[in-house]
Image (cartoon, rainbow, N blue to C red):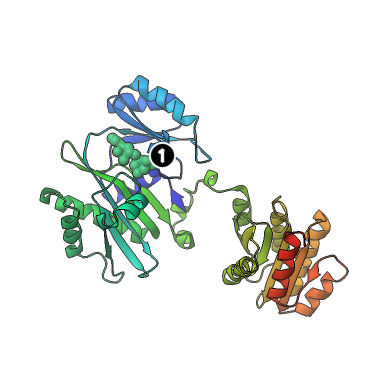
Amino acid sequence: MKLHEYQSKILFTMYGIPIPNGRIANSAKEVRQISDELGGKVVIKAQVLVGGRGKVGGVRIAKSSDEAEEFANQILSMEIKGLPVRKVLVDEAVSISQEFYLSIANDRNTQKPVLMASSSGGVEVEDVALKTPERIIKRTIDPLLGLRDYQLRDVAINIDLDRMYWQEFGEIINGVWKVYVECDATLVEINPLVITADKRLLALDAKIILDDNALFRHPSLAELRDKDAESGPEIKGRAFGVTFIKMEGNIGCLVNGAGLAMATMDIIKTLGGDAANFLDIGGGATAEKVAASLRLILEDQNVKAILINVFGGITRCDEVAKGLMTAYNEVKPEIPIIVRLVGTNDEEGLRLLRGSSLIPAETLVEAATIAVQKAYGG
Ligand code: ADP
Ligand code: MG
């Protein structure tokens, strides 16, 4: 789950990471008021959960409160990469003498946290990584030992940071590390971290991604979720307890277990098809949950065939079949639904499907082959 910049900055303050003075606003009027309080030279920043706002006019520097109000009106009526701007952050504008990049993230390769820093801050880090990878300093952090002091000095030297800032820089990295650990984040990023003309270190931008699987430990952070950032079916799916992710293809998938769902999508791809979604009904799903899942898949107009792949363990195949028949009888879909049910109570499950137009298949390959053929009209 991504946090907004203003939410991330609140966490930064709690962990002692310095940020510019500023406040969040919902209207241009409020922006004017905040701008007056901050002295008129402010930055108006669209709060949407995408990067590169600066490039598309979502970050504007105003020289007066009049200008601040004008920019706020413009930004609050924008859509950035498909997301409506509902709030803007008003920060004091600072004069920047140097911009750095700093982050701690999960590194899948080393399976450890990685600290990254660069003196090429402000621009998208992906661009730096592509064009001048040597400018990104990466240091793996041992999760048991934590961040070590020598690592801080090592990074400071390698980004050519003036010695007078080392102490402060160390405190900032330690703050980032604490946010990362204590909030169960997968990414904590400051881009840019700047040295101002009056020689202060400030986090001008803030990005935090939290690990969804650890959110149950942070109920107050979980409440910060922005529903705009997720598409309709994903929220609906979460509401009845399944993991649903929309994809671009035309074969709907309903599967129990994330691993099996991935394998199912892989097989569809191998056979030349494309999955319309990832859907994991989890273990021990009830008929209601299965019915709701099938309805959700059927809402997608792109779907030309549906593949049900259930390997019954805790999940009972008869319960799955009941759910399928409920949604099927209600919606009466014209598109072919191919069902592979094996495991607990599979015979009973298949018996329940008999007489309907659902197409049973014995193996996953057989089921996926039929689904791909049907999806492409063959
Ligand atoms: P994004 O990464 O989405 O483009 P940023 O918050 O990084 O948004 O802002 C883009 C650029 O705007 C920054 O790299 C910085 O140069 C400038 N900027 C952002 N906040 C301020 C500020 N408070 N004062 C002066 N310049 C700023
Ligand atoms: Mg930025």
Image quarter for ligand 1: top left
Question: Of all residues shown, which one is farthest toward the right?
Answer: 355
Residue 138 at x, y = what percent? 27, 61
Above or below 65: residue 90: below
Residue at 54% in and 43% down: 228
Question: Of all residues shown, which one is farthest toward the left?
Answer: 164
Residue 302 vs residue 238, the one in the foreground: 302
Residue 136 at x, y = what percent? 27, 56
Above or below 90: residue 375: below
Q: How crowded is mark 1: few (under 14 residues within 10 Å), some or many (20 or more)?
A: some
Q: What residue type is labelled 1?
A: Arg
Residue at 31% in and 29% down: 42
Read off the residue under disc 1: 53
Horizontal side of residue 297 vs 202, given as left or right = right
Horizontal side of residue 149 vs 281, given as left or right = left
- Asked which secondary structure carries label 1, the reply is loop
The response on whether ligand 1 sits within 8 Å of label 1 is yes
Horizontal side of residue 170 vs 81, given as left or right = left
Residue at 42% in and 27% down: 72
Residue at 66% in and 71% down: 284
Residue 347 at x, y = what percent? 79, 79
- Specify whether residue 366 is in view: yes
Residue 341 at x, y = what percent? 73, 74
Examine the image and state in which quarter residue 310 appears. bottom right
